Image: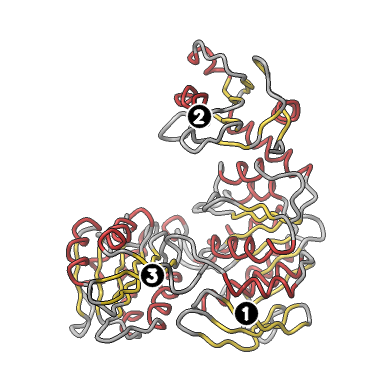
């Protein structure tokens, strides 16, 4: 296996002090002893809840080739004899290594932020660029103050493309991260009421997302949602930041990456889009109008980094979903199949609307029903009650007439839904579980949607546990 970093390069990048007999190099980077692979370097990061130094022995047992530890923690590590690189601050050392990885890379770099669709867009870019070159991308949703430098530090020096997801829930979080990433292309998927509890309004959220402009490489490009209500504000801020290449994607007539035609089906979409003066027709293997919008950004970014668009468009046909982000399962009820749509990873008003539209477009069979299982949308602050209650109009406007609600904020919604919508409310996922499991019947389509902190993934696991699942009927991202 080829080395990710030589030990000499590791020490030099982090300005560290080596102790012990160092290996030639390391093959991977870990901050979690449970997932560490033999030959990895283990960074003993001190987090809010746990300190990586407490897991140094476990890391050695798992096969760590090198430990990166803080000078101040050295006395507490006792008799450990593994090779170590001693630094002043372990997270700062990881950041330095990430910066060094970026400096040595010749890859085309794409950074993605936005209120919804970040991970989906990042994974779609990974998927469509893989046929045309070696791709490196963030694992899961590694988009914060440790996830971004970790992803950078893991970037091989020979990759052709690298995609980074950059998240935030406060101002000034994106700025330091994007200055490490230094993308050639920056995408803002959309501006919506996510993390609104930390901001006064959507304009403030847009301004925080616009921090991504500050790290853009000279002559780099920005890709913005031309259909978004904050397009003008973002466009203005991009030009104020000195960016010359600002492109829009969407249905808007003035979009650079423009949707010309779209046919939505239960398990896929067919689109025609104008990308770089070329009309591209493609099958998108993931259903939903929101997915089409993300794909326009993906096609635009792929064009801007010079990818072969024929191969990119062909790859869209078999996009596959991540767990919690629209992944579909066919559950085998004794009397017939049930379709489960797992949207349990995250929720805000915009993604809730997209998920309800997806449920509405999914056909039921026989006497089946469309069932929405909805949990609280978190981090909405003083706006929370109003935004949860506003979901009533969203639900009434669909064909969904059976709703299961859980979480303290969803009580407001439960109290105002009309009588023709069968509603079950419980305090949380555990209380809701037996009610939901006993209510399902053949032909139903059930969609589970909530913020991650509400724990509705337990409901997904319970459904998969009770009803054996076939492979998904469609692939989604």
Residue 346, picture quadrant = bottom left
Task: Give the mark, 2 or 1, whose residue is nearer the N terminus.
Answer: 2
Percent x, y for residue 407?
26, 60
Q: Which residue is drawn at 49% across and 77% down?
A: 287
Tag 3, which secondary structure?
A: strand
Q: Which residue matches tag 1?
A: 250
Label 3: how many residues lie within 10 Å, few (<14), some (14-19) or many (20+)? Answer: many
Looking at the rendering, which quadrant does residue 464 occupy? bottom left
Q: Residues within 10 Å of mark 1 (few under 14, many from 20)?
A: many
Q: Are marks 1 and 3 in contact (CB under 8 Å)?
A: no
- The residue mark sitting in front, 2 or 3, is 2
Viewer-nearest of discs 2 and 1: 2
Going by the image, does 228 lie left or right of 447? right
- What is the image's colouring? secondary structure
Mark 2 to mark 1: distance in Å? Answer: 48 Å
Q: Which sits in the foreground, 128 or 349?
A: 128
Residue 30 in the image: x percent, y percent? 56, 36
Position in image of residue 452 (x %, y %) = 38, 56
Picture residue at 75% right of the left edge, 26% below the top: 8
Q: Earlier in the sequence, mark 2 or mark 3?
A: 2
Is the residue under label 1 in contact with that under label 2 (CB below 8 Å)? no
Write down the residue under mark 3: 341
Callout 2 touching callout 3 (CB < 8 Å):
no
Question: Quick check: 23 left or right of 404?
Answer: right
The first of marks 1 and 3 along the sequence is 1
- Mark 2 lies on a secondary structure that is loop
Question: Residue 4 versus residue 38: which sits nearer the camera?
Answer: 38
Q: Is mark 1 on a helix, strand or loop?
A: strand
Q: Which residue position holds label 2? A: 62
């Amino acid at each position: 296996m080829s080395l990710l970093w030589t030990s000499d390069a590791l020490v030099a990048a982090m300005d560290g002090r080596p102790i012990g007999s160092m290996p030639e190099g390391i093959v991977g980077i870990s901050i979690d002893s449970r997932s560490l692979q033999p030959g990895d370097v283990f960074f003993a990061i001190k987090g809010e809840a746990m300190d990586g130094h407490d897991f140094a022995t476990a890391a050695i047992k798992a096969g760590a080739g090198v430990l990166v530890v803080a000078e101040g923690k050295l006395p507490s590590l006792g008799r450990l004899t593994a090779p170590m690189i001693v630094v002043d601050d372990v997270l700062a050392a990881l950041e330095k290594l990430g910066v060094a990885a970026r400096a040595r890379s010749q890859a085309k770099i794409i950074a993605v932020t936005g209120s919804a669709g970040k991970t989906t867009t990042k994974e779609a870019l990974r998927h469509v660029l893989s046929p045309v070159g070696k791709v490196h991308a963030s694992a899961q949703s590694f988009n914060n103050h440790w996830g971004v430098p970790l992803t950078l530090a893991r970037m091989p020096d020979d990759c052709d493309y690298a995609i980074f997801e950059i998240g935030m829930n406060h101002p000034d979080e994106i700025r330091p991260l994007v200055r490490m990433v230094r993308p050639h292309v920056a995408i803002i998927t959309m501006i919506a009421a996510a993390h609104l509890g930390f901001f006064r309004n959507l304009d403030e959220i847009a301004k925080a997302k616009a921090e991504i402009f500050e790290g853009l490489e000279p002559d780099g490009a920005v890709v913005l949602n031309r259909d978004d209500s904050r397009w003008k504000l973002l466009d203005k801020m991009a030009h104020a930041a000195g960016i010359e290449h600002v492109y829009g994607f969407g249905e808007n007539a003035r979009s650079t990456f423009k949707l010309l035609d779209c046919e939505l089906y239960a398990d896929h979409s067919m689109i025609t889009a104008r990308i770089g003066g070329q009309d591209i027709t493609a099958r998108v293997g993931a259903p939903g109008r929101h997915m089409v919008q993300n794909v326009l950004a993906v096609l635009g970014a792929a064009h801007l980094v010079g990818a072969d668009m024929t191969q990119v468009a062909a790859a869209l046909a078999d996009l596959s979903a991540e767990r919690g982000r629209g992944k579909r399962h066919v559950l085998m009820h004794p009397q017939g199949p049930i379709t489960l749509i797992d949207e349990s990873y995250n929720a805000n008003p915009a993604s809730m609307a997209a998920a309800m539209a997806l449920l509405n477009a999914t056909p039921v069979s026989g006497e089946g029903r469309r069932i929405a299982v909805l949990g609280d949308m978190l981090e909405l602050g003083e706006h929370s009650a109003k935004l949860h209650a506003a979901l009533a109009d969203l639900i009434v406007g669909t064909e969904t007439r059976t709703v299961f609600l859980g979480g303290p904020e969803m009580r407001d919604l439960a109290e105002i839904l009309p009588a023709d919508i069968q509603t079950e409310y419980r305090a949380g996922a555990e209380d809701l579980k037996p009610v939901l499991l006993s209510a399902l019947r053949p032909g139903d389509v059930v969609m589970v949607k909530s913020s991650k902190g509400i724990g509705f993934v337990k409901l997904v696991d319970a459904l998969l546990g009770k009803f054996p699942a076939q492979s998904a009927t469609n692939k989604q991202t």
